[in-house]
């Protein structure tokens, strides 16, 4: 009887909900001058302390009880729109926002954090606008996406001139990098000096470090999700810049006014053109192209075709030439089924190519990885309490570990193709954002992934099915020669199959509009491995799929955070603190003396172990006023170990935990911007990082007159601490206000106090004294630069 009474009370409490009609307000938010859809716009209802933000395609939907409401539409850099809406039926309302300033670029720090975001369960996410990226002083004056995110807490690099980035103690290959949903396998130009992303073409950028939604998968460290602009369907616009070593130009305009638009952008470096003046025959340059076409069929259907193509070339005289780069394309269809149901279908191609031409030995080397991805995503705005994301995607991979062929008739090289590898990765997910109460919101989801290693032309067979053996007398691991080769497999055969369930959950409890705590748990599985025995990826590194001898990597990450909005005087501040713990199984390690380049049997030199990372992140931001900026600090630890497979084996590093190359105990970064007036703006960065783990000789012995160094456990020593200061000043001519041609001059100084940070320390024997000595190699000292930006 008591249980029946509880049920009646519960049903009675729901009666007001059923008795009151609810209606849906939905639509698309665009830029009034370009018709470009806007991502992350806040649609707020102050009386209800509720709201919604636009998705990655500018669409929003919210269901509310019948009534009359004041709605406020806000987006950084745009004028607020405030309207009163009588919600007595379902309403489709598209809104166009106008910019608040008519100058070249407004310097901002980050996407505005609206008060309603305090209540969102999403955590461990940082968003940057293209204006933020352009305002940060960087090497050689070229605005750079990767250099910008390195200022964020939990993000580091392997050093100056190093490609990739590391997130929360993870390796660079553990980051999923997406450009218009297509995978970018190498994010760097000129071996890490620049990134492949043209800031003029970028519309939105988000870096997920934890609490990663179930729609993402395939990497275990982070997701960098970047969307390109769609193109101006109102009028033709030109944006560009001329820098010290590279220039860029972007053109966008209507194909059919208000219905179809194009975007075409290009960048190129040209410093190599001046090398002949100094009697230098070497070359090093890059170029890339960004393209996009969009067509609005009607209010419910839009088509997009986007692409990126980039190449780097490095050559030494005529004897050595290296070419590498990415090529991606995406055909996308957005469809609105109803006011509550939105879909996106994509056909995506991604390719990474690496080529090497060694003329002095007479051969060419080509390798790479490509995939074709078919994906379909749905967003269902179920009611005012619940939003459901779901979707499927399927990727087909082709891995080319290398093809060698003669480069001329006189070459003695015999053409050979290393065995290509093939794989298929399928995933399905559902993700729910659920508002349980006014104060408590949760996001929970599940991703199912399946990875199949497909048949290939040849498969090695090993004694006891062990490609790596342990010598108990020498106490070392050794590569085993195959005892045979199986050539019976067809492409449709399955060499190995892996299935995984990847649960995700995040929760936010808001004490009020300004304070909340958040927590998240994330499981991620990575089926690809980057074969590299350097601390930073290089173009020569090879991707390989999981298979018979390499299991996937699996991550479990836990995070908890405290978030606070503050008003001090007339200024707004935001405090974000997070603690995290990551545990990874299946991390690849290499036996001593491993040879990775052109290795057709990579299973003979790898073992698998585990990794872990944990730390505390702190971020303080000042969000408004003439003086803006942020201070970030990370205290963290990153380790890995590979124990023996049996009690008799020692494992790598005797099975003990050792520092990963990207373990930086302390990481401090500060970015400050000051707007003196309409003409002058100033910016600065300061960075400090604990030195990178490395190995120095701990002793030596002499054998037949040769001095041979000895080393201790892996990564036991460190390079000197890294720190530098960057400065910039932006001059905007006053005549910009009265003409369509708008411009600015950016003066920057990288490494203002000329710190000679060590990229490496090598040990050698002095030819004159015979004494051993350490030699520090530094890549950059102080570098001044000037860039001229324009648009019309």
Image (spheres, rainbow, N blue to C red):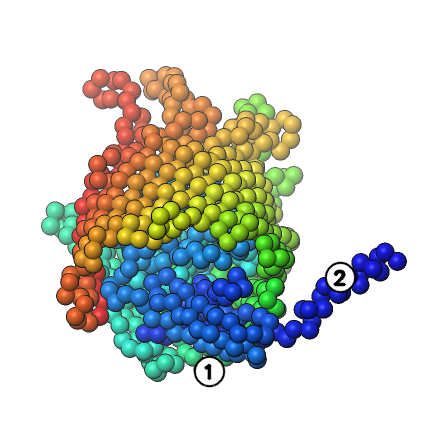
Callout in the foreground (1, 2): 2
Q: Is residue 765 above or below residue 375?
A: above
Foreground residue among 571 and 148: 571
Identify the residue at image location x=43%, y=79%. Answer: 296
Foreground residue among 5 and 313: 5
Q: Which quadrant of the view contains residue 29?
A: bottom left
**SS for callout 1:** strand
Q: Which quadrant of the view contains residue 661?
A: top left
Neighbor class of circle 1 (other Cα within 10 Å; few <14, some 14-19, many 20+) is few
Q: Is residue 271 left or right of residue 94?
A: left
Q: Is residue 280 above or below residue 59?
A: above
Identify the residue at image location x=61%, y=74%. Answer: 22
Q: Quadrant of the N terminus?
A: bottom right
Identify the residue at image location x=57%, y=70%. Answer: 63
Question: Residue 246: x, y in percent?
Answer: 22, 56
Determine the CA span between mark 1 and mark 2: 45 Å
Q: Is residue 104 left or right of residue 640?
A: left
Q: Quadrant of the C terminus?
A: bottom left
Q: Is residue 168 left or right of residue 680?
A: right
Q: Is residue 309 above or below residue 496?
A: below
Foreground residue among 209 and 319: 209
Residue 367 visible somewhere in the drawing: no
Foreground residue among 9 and 275: 9
**SS for callout 2:** helix
Neighbor class of circle 2 (other Cα within 10 Å; few <14, some 14-19, many 20+) is few
Identify the residue at image location x=42%, y=24%. Answer: 711
Dot 1 or dot 2: first in sequence order is: 2
Residue 298 circle label: 1
Mark 2 lies on residue = 10
């Amino acid at each position: 009887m008591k249980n029946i009474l509880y049920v009646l009370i519960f049903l009675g409490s729901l009666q007001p909900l059923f008795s009151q009609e609810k209606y849906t307000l939905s639509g698309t938010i665009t830029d009034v001058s370009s018709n470009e859809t806007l991502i992350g716009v806040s649609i707020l209802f102050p009386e209800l302390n509720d709201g919604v933000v636009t998705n990655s395609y500018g669409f929003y939907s919210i269901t509310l009880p019948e009534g009359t409401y004041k709605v406020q539409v806000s987006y950084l850099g745009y004028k607020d729109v405030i309207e009163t809406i009588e919600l007595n039926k379902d309403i489709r309302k598209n809104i166009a926002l106008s910019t608040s300033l008519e100058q070249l670029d407004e310097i901002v720090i980050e996407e505005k954090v609206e008060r309603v975001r305090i209540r969102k369960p999403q955590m461990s996410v940082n968003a940057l606008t293209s204006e933020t990226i352009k305002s940060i002083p960087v090497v050689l004056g070229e605005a750079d996406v990767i250099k910008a995110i390195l200022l964020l807490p939990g993000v580091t690099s392997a050093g100056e001139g190093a490609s990739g980035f590391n997130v929360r103690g993870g390796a660079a290959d553990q980051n999923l990098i997406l450009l218009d949903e297509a995978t970018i396998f190498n994010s760097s130009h000129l071996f890490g000096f620049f990134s492949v992303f043209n800031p003029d073409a970028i519309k939105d950028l988000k870096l997920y470090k934890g609490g990663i939604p179930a729609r993402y998968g395939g990497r275990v460290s982070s997701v960098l999700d970047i969307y390109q602009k769609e193109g101006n369907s109102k009028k033709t616009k030109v944006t560009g810049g001329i820098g010290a070593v590279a220039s860029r130009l972007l053109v966008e305009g209507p194909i059919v006014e208000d219905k179809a638009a194009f975007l075409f952008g290009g960048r190129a470096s040209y410093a190599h053109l001046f090398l002949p003046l100094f009697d230098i025959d070497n070359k090093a340059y890059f170029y890339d192209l960004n393209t996009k076409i969009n067509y609005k069929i009607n209010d419910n259907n839009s088509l997009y075709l986007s692409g990126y193509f980039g190449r780097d070339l490095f050559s030494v005289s005529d004897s050595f030439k290296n070419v590498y780069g990415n090529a991606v394309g995406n055909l996308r269809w957005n469809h609105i089924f109803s006011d509550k149901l939105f879909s996106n279908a994509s056909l995506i191609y991604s390719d990474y190519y690496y080529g090497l031409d060694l003329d002095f030995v007479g051969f060419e080397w080509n390798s790479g990885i490509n995939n074709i991805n078919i994906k379909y995503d749905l967003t269902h705005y179920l009611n005012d309490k619940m939003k459901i994301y779901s979707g499927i995607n399927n990727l087909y991979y082709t891995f080319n570990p290398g093809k060698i062929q003669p480069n001329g008739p006189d070459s003695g090289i015999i053409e050979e193709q290393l065995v290509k590898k093939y794989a298929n990765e399928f995933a399905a997910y559902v993700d729910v954002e659920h508002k349980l109460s006014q104060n408590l919101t949760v996001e929970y989801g599940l991703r199912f992934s399946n990875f199949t290693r497909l048949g290939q032309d040849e498969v090695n067979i090993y004694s006891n099915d062990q490609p790596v053996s342990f010598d108990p007398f020498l106490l070392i691991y050794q590569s085993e020669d195959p005892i045979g080769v199986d050539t019976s497999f067809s492409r449709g055969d399955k060499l190995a199959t892996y299935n995984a369930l990847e649960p995700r959950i995040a929760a936010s409890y808001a004490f009020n509009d300004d304070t909340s705590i958040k927590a998240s748990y994330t499981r991620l599985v990575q089926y690809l491995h980057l074969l590299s025995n350097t601390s930073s990826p290089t173009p020569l590194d090879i991707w390989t799929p999981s298979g018979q001898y390499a299991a996937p990597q699996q991550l479990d990450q836990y995070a908890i955070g405290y978030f606070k909005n503050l008003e001090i005087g007339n200024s707004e501040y935001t405090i974000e603190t997070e603690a995290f713990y990551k545990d990874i199984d299946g991390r690849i390690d290499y036996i001593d003396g491993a040879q990775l380049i052109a290795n057709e049997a990579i299973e003979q030199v790898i073992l698998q172990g585990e990794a872990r990372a944990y730390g505390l992140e702190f971020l303080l931001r000042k969000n408004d006023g003439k003086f803006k900026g942020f201070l970030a600090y990370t205290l963290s630890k990153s380790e890995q170990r590979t124990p023996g497979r049996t009690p008799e084996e020692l494992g790598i590093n005797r099975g003990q935990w050792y520092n990963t190359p990207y373990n930086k105990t302390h990481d401090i970064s500060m970015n400050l911007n000051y707007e003196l007036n309409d003409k002058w703006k100033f910016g600065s960065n300061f960075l400090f990082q604990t030195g990178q783990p490395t190995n120095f000789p701990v002793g030596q012995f002499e054998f037949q007159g040769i001095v041979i160094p000895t080393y201790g456990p892996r990564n036991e020593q460190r390079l000197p601490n890294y720190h530098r200061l960057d400065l910039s000043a932006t001059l905007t001519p006053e005549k910009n206000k009265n003409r369509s041609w708008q411009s600015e001059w950016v003066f920057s100084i990288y490494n203002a106090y000329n710190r000679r940070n060590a990229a490496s320390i090598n040990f050698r024997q002095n030819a004159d004294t015979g004494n051993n000595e350490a030699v520090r190699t530094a890549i950059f000292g102080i570098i001044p630069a000037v860039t001229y930006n324009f648009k019309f």
